[in-house]
Amino acid sequence: MSRIDEIRIARPDVAALIDRGLLAVVERLLEVERERDAARAARSRGPIGDSRTTHAPPSTDPRPKPRSQRRKTGKKTGGQPGHAGHRLEPVATPDQIVVHPATACAGCGHDLTAAPVASTIAHQVFELPKLPLVVTEHRMERKVCPCCAATTTAPPPAGAEQPTQYGPRLAGLAVYLHVGHFVPLERTADIIEVLTGRRVSEGWISACQERVSSRLDPFINAVTTCLRAAKNLCCDETGFRFAGRRFWLHVCCTALLTLMLCHRRRGGEGTTALGVLPGYTGNATHDHWAPYFRFDSCTHSVCNEHHVRELDGVSERDGQGWAERMKIVLYDGLDLKRRYHDHDQDIPPTDIAALTARYQRCLRDGYASTPQPQTDPTRTRGRPKRGKTLALLDRLRDRQDETLRFLHDRNVPWSNNQAERDIRPMKIQQKVSGGFRTEAGAIVFCRIRSYISTTTKNGIDPCDALALALAGKPWLPKTMLPLPGRMPAAA
């Protein structure tokens, strides 16, 4: 049997096409080429790359999902040898003890009711009890003066001004669920009803948020002061829309502090309104957004995680080997930082010089591999387009000091991940509820998120912290002491 006979048997559609003659085969071939060209044109109109390598949203990513950015270690997944592990540890003094007697022998069935107990085996169950609200009645005495007959009533304590009202811890829980975990108002009321048997109103939850926000001025001032004294800051911004307009969330943060602000401008005006970078003398870590570099009283470092994502785009888009080598250089710098800075040691100058030489070699290879753009004689205004690859090379060349500053300063991180983690809640809020209805609501959200994030970083119970704020005594950061294994967040 010939090859053509095998094809005719396996593909009846092709056999029918062959029977129609050579012209039918040629027409079908041309049709396939047109379909291929149309598909290529459709791809060229979309963004080049995906959300890891461009500013395209993750919803436009092709399937399967992008691979992880984590470097391969060669180790098996799961716990590594020597890992201590964790489990639910028993307590020495349980709240309640229930004894289960052994009544009959498992071997012969003999009655063991009167037999002495040789030993016991303890099984502990950790359970959440029903949480009924504790109602405290405050009785203010009224007395009549024997001299002037005037009646005097004792003043009510703080937090009990009304005949009936909810306490600050319940109000703190409601705010924590809504702002801290983005639970919508109705579902927050549902959760509280399930836990306590009492249903609060959505308006009460909103009023609690406004009260918390209005009493956070001392906290905002204290955090701003501590941030301005920090040796390194992480900065970022992200956009969101409501009321038909685009607004921006700005953040400045450290490992122990968070400060957020909602503003109508993305650039220097919004960053200035946050009140940290003007006059700041430490180091600011951020992406390549140009307005950050206008604050010249401080040094700057740029996020290498952003560089890795863009280098991935160059590798996938152009297939240039220098991009992969540059990624290795940046990751080797991160390994040096962990090896020396995490143990309070400076990186040896010889290691820094060797890494810097490799960095510059990759830049030279990148420029050699990337053709310069052709000059458009019809273009009379503006700078000629450089393309994504050349633009990245220009930034890595012009901002070499800022890119490699993490090697020279222990306080400078390798990436801006701290700010990205702190700013992520805004995106979750948009996914859950679609955003905000008013600018005032966004401002309240930012102030309370700053408070919750900072207290959580410092190991403070968020419900206790919110209760303190509702009582007019918000928790305030003082001297920022370094955590074990971390760089100091503030001087």
Image: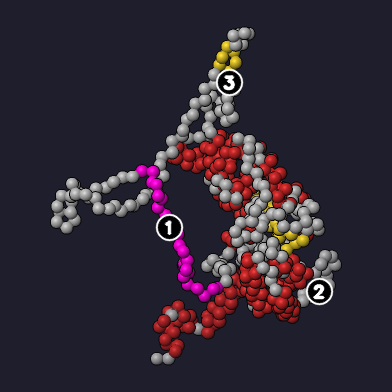
**Type of secondary structure dominating the magenta stretch:** loop
| Magenta run includes residue 92 | yes
- Name the residue nearer the viewer: 277 or 485: 485
How many labels, in total?
A: 3
Q: Is residue 9 above or below residue 470?
A: below
Q: Is residue 97 above or below residue 132?
A: below
Left or right: 274 with respect to 116? right
* Of 476 and 48, the residue lying toward us: 476
Q: SS at mark 1?
A: loop
Report the disc number at residue 375.
2
Disc 1: which residue:
87
Residue 250, position as x, y percentages in the image: 69, 51
Element class at badge 3: loop
How many angstroms separate mark 3 from mark 1 (CA)? 52 Å
Which numbered mark, 1 or 2, is in the foreground of this view? Answer: 1
Going by the numbered disc 3, the residue's amino acid type is: Ala
Q: Which residues are magenta?
A: 72-96
Q: Are marks 3 and 1 in contact (CB under 8 Å)?
A: no
* Residue furthest bottom as drawn: 1
Question: Is residue 164 in sight in this rendering?
Answer: yes
Q: CA distance from mark 2 to mark 3?
A: 85 Å
The stretch drawn in magenta includes residue 355: no
Mark 1 closeness class: few <14, some 14–19, many ≥20 residues within 10 Å: few
Q: Name the residue beneath numbered marker 3.
A: 154
- Please tell me which of labels 3 and 1 falls first in the chain: 1
